[in-house]
Image (cartoon, rainbow, N blue to C red):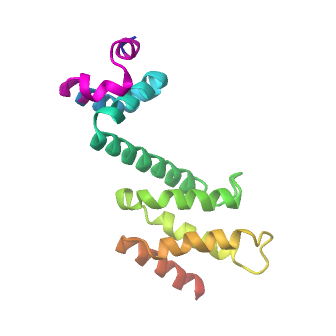
Amino acid sequence: LNTYMLQAFVPLEKAADILPESLASALALLAMDPSFQSAYPAAHEVVVAYVEQTSEDDYQLYNHAQHVCTSIDCSVQFVKEKDFEGGRSLQDMVELAEGALSSLPYHQHLTLVSQFVRLCSDICKPVHPNPQLVPDCTRVLLKVLAHPEDSVRHTAYQTCLNTAR
């Protein structure tokens, strides 16, 4: 109901000029609230649109937080499928691993890195039935090997070494 009133009284294009700073700050906090997002998805979209108009910094922070949350979700899904036989395709697993890279500095779950390197080893074997996955897998593996976090790079190189032995 309140978002409908907001839309009726404050045109989105003029939100930066009309809304008081305290209300804009409150909307930015509300945009970050996951329970509000789950309970009222349509109202959440309206709030995010107003945040985008009123504060570029808050909107960028919101987008970054959403990106990290999505990346953590990819990490969880990848680790849950640790045997790579849970019904997901290998292509899905490679995409999940790539999506998980952004969140590694936050959760430091290095088992994910080891699991991905072993998955790449399996995919890149000459007898593997799907050679089309090799370029995607190689691209993501190179991202892991060049990751900005030392611990991620170390784990990736260590797992590559152990796999090659």
- The picture quadrant where one finds residue 128 is bottom right
Quadrant position of residue 120 = bottom right
Residue 87 visible in the displayed image: yes
Q: Nearer the viewer, residue 101 or 116?
A: 101
In the displayed structure, would residue 54 be above or below residue 157? above
Any magenta on residue 9?
Answer: yes
What range of the chain is rendered magenta? 3-24
| Residue 141 spot, x, y in % from top left | 55, 73
Q: Is residue 101 above or below residue 29?
A: below
Q: Quadrant of residue 35?
A: top left
In front of the other: 89 or 136:
136
Q: Main secondary structure of the magenta part?
A: helix
**Residue 17 placed where, x, y %?**
25, 26
Q: Is residue 32 visible?
A: no
The residue at the point 45 percent across, 76 percent down is: 146
At 71% from the left edge and 68% from the top edge, which residue is drawn?
Answer: 133
In the image, what residue occupies the spot 31% across and 25% down?
A: 15
The residue sitting at the bottom extreme is 165
x and y, in percent, of residue 44 in the image:
42, 26
User: Does 20 sit left or right of 113 as displayed?
Assistant: left
Left or right: where 61 falls relative to 111:
left
| Quadrant the C terminus occupies | bottom right
Q: Does the magenta-highlighted stretch encompass residue 63? A: no
Residue drawn at point x = 68 percent, y = 60 percent: 91
**Going by the image, does 127 lie left or right of 139?**
right
Q: Nearer the viewer, residue 129 or 159?
A: 129
